[in-house]
């Protein structure tokens, strides 16, 4: 099961969700994709009051999907039900004003020990201004590769859903770090064991692993530049491809989104909130390590 190593820092989960550079959700595995939780971390609300979707209060989530992409989204959900791994797809939403919005979504079916799907947990980002991530609408994950369940089973789903429960269920690693030399984490949630071989709790302990130490050496300058740019101002948003090193010393490519943030948990108050998606089974998104987009606040 994924571990959240933040027992000594309570209350950060809700803040991290609000600052993530995208939108997080929990929905039912039903025909309407009934939303039980929605949080727009960086203002990607698409013109809606997101709470109008929760429990189908005024909108069905399916009503915000582009008409031509409904079959694809159904296939997306069916693929999650068939595989333990996270599934990544590109499709389109429709803003409240009718404009089309291309998104990149990574989601997984959350299961109990008996294998029953309790919910779908996902994260998506508006890729309108992230050209390298754009392309045809389709499922991007290569499902022929061995399944890796990044979080594992849970005993139950809370009602209402909480940020503390949701963050470890996401198909991405969520983090809040300072912009110092070691990228000292103040929050870290997700799985590093199945993908990289590390015990996530060791990054929060002192002495322990350094976040900077897992960056592939050839990408260290890129990592430093990206964190400096994002952290310079609250709300700065940056997306990049980066290589990290697994426990065996091999490079693993990830897609990272960073957002400049301020919090008294940071030494000096300044840092970033970020998300990282492993690209080992998403070949269409792989490529050279580089900054893909920078959106100043």
Image (cartoon, grey):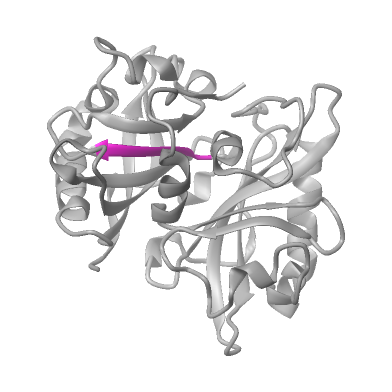
**The C terminus lies in which quarter of the figure?**
bottom left
Work out whether residue 110 or residue 266 is closer to the camera in this orientation and state it. Answer: 266
Residue 38 in percent (x, y) is at: 61, 58
Residue 249 in view of the camera: yes
Instruction: Give the image location of residue 283, x and y in percent.
Output: 51, 44
The residue located at (79%, 52%) in the rendering is 28
Image coordinates of residue 173 in percent, x first then y, are 46, 36
Q: Residue at x 16, y 54 (%)?
A: 229
Does residue 174 belong to the magenta stretch?
A: yes
Which is more toward the observer, 102 or 161? 161
Viewer can see residue 288:
no
- Taking the spot 29% from the left edge, 30% from the top edge, the residue there is 185
> Which residues, given as a range, are shown in magenta?
172-177
Q: In which quarter of the image is the N terminus?
A: top right
**Residue 139, horizontal then vertical, whole percent:** 66, 54
Q: Classify 273 as above or below 139.
A: above
The residue shown at (79%, 56%) is 75
Q: Does the magenta stretch include residue 244?
A: no
């Amino acid at each position: 099961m994924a571990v959240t190593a933040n027992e000594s820092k309570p209350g950060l989960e809700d803040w991290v969700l609000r600052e993530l550079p995208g939108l997080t959700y929990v929905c039912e595995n039903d025909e309407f994709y009934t939303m039980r939780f929605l949080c727009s971390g960086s203002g990607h609300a698409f013109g809606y009051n997101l709470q109008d979707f929760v429990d189908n209060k005024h909108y069905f989530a399916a009503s915000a999907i582009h008409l031509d992409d409904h079959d694809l989204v159904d296939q997306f959900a069916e693929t999650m039900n068939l595989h333990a791994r996270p599934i990544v797809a590109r499709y389109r939403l429709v803003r409240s004003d009718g404009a089309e919005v291309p998104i990149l979504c990574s989601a997984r079916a959350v299961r109990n020990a008996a294998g029953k799907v309790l919910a779908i947990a996902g994260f998506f980002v508006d890729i309108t201004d992230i050209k390298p991530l754009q392309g045809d609408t389709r499922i991007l994950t290569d499902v022929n590769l061995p399944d890796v369940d990044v979080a594992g089973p849970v005993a139950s789903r809370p009602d209402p859903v909480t940020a503390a429960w949701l963050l470890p269920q996401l198909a991405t690693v969520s983090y809040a770090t300072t912009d110092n030399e070691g990228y000292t984490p103040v929050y870290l949630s997700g799985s590093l064991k199945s993908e990289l071989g590390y015990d996530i709790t060791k990054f929060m302990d002192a002495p322990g692993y350094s976040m900077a130490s897992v960056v592939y050496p050839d990408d260290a300058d890129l990592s430093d530049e990206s964190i400096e740019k994002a952290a310079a101002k609250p709300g700065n948003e940056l997306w990049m491809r980066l290589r990290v090193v697994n426990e065996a010393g091999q490079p693993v490519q990830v897609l990272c989104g960073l957002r400049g943030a301020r919090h008294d948990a940071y030494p000096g108050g300044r840092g970033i909130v970020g998300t990282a998606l492993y690209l080992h089974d998403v070949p269409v998104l792989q490529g050279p390590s580089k900054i893909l987009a920078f959106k100043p606040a």
